[in-house]
Image (tube, rainbow, N blue to C red):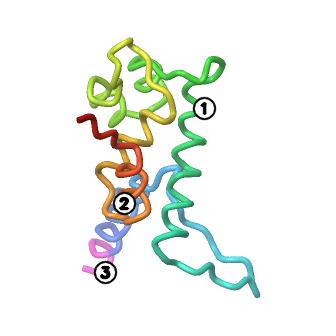
Amino acid sequence: MTISRTIIIALLLTATAGSVHAGDRIWDPVPGAKPQKQDAASIQKLLDQELRAKFDAAAKSNHLLTAQAASDAGLGFVADHFVQIDSNHDGYASFDDVQTFFDGRSPLPAARARVAAKVQVVE
């Protein structure tokens, strides 16, 4: 019974070991480091930095993203919603287009405020 239990545990650990990916944020904190303050503004700043880094990696030279480039870079959500993101329907999306798309779906007040500031009322 002990051997079968050990085998089951080993199989479970092996199965769950593959669920961690290189991009996952699992690390040991630096000893003596102060934890960063976690508020809406700091979270929004972190998300903006991550989005900018991923966009820049995908849109390499011309700073414009295509649906294919988004897909190739592993930005599946952006590729799947590219028609909505590409506001002028020219086949390219700028960082501002992508950020506006994400900000419109964000629960964070700072992101919502950015979207509201971009709304143009025409009378």
Task: Indicate whether 37 appears above or below 19.
Answer: below
Read off the magenta span: 1-5
Furthest residue in direction front, as rendered: 123
Task: Indicate whether 90 appears above or below 77.
Answer: above
| SS for dot 2 | helix
The amino acid type, in three-letter code, at marker 1 is Ala
Task: Indicate whether 93 appears above or below 33.
Answer: above
The amino acid type, in three-letter code, at marker 2 is Thr
Q: CA distance from mark 1 to mark 3?
A: 50 Å
Q: Quadrant of the C terminus?
A: top left
* Residue found at x 38% / y 13%: 91
Residue 86, position in %: x, y? 35, 24
Residue 11, position in %: x, y? 33, 61
* Residue under numbered circle 1: 57
Which of the 4 image quarters holds residue 80? top left
Q: Which mark is residue 95?
A: none
Label 2 environment density (alpha carbons within 10 Å; few <14, some 14–19, many ≥20): few
Label 1 environment density (alpha carbons within 10 Å; few <14, some 14–19, many ≥20): some
User: Horizontal placement of 33 versus 56: left or right?
Assistant: right
* Residue found at x 35% / y 40%: 101
Residue in the foreground of this view, choosing between 55 and 86: 86
* Residue under numbered circle 2: 16
Q: Which mark is residue 2?
A: 3
The mark total stands at 3
Q: Earlier in the sequence, mark 1 or mark 3?
A: 3
Q: Quadrant of the N terminus?
A: bottom left
Label 3 environment density (alpha carbons within 10 Å; few <14, some 14–19, many ≥20): few
Q: Earlier in the sequence, mark 3 or mark 2?
A: 3
* Residue found at x 54% / y 65%: 26
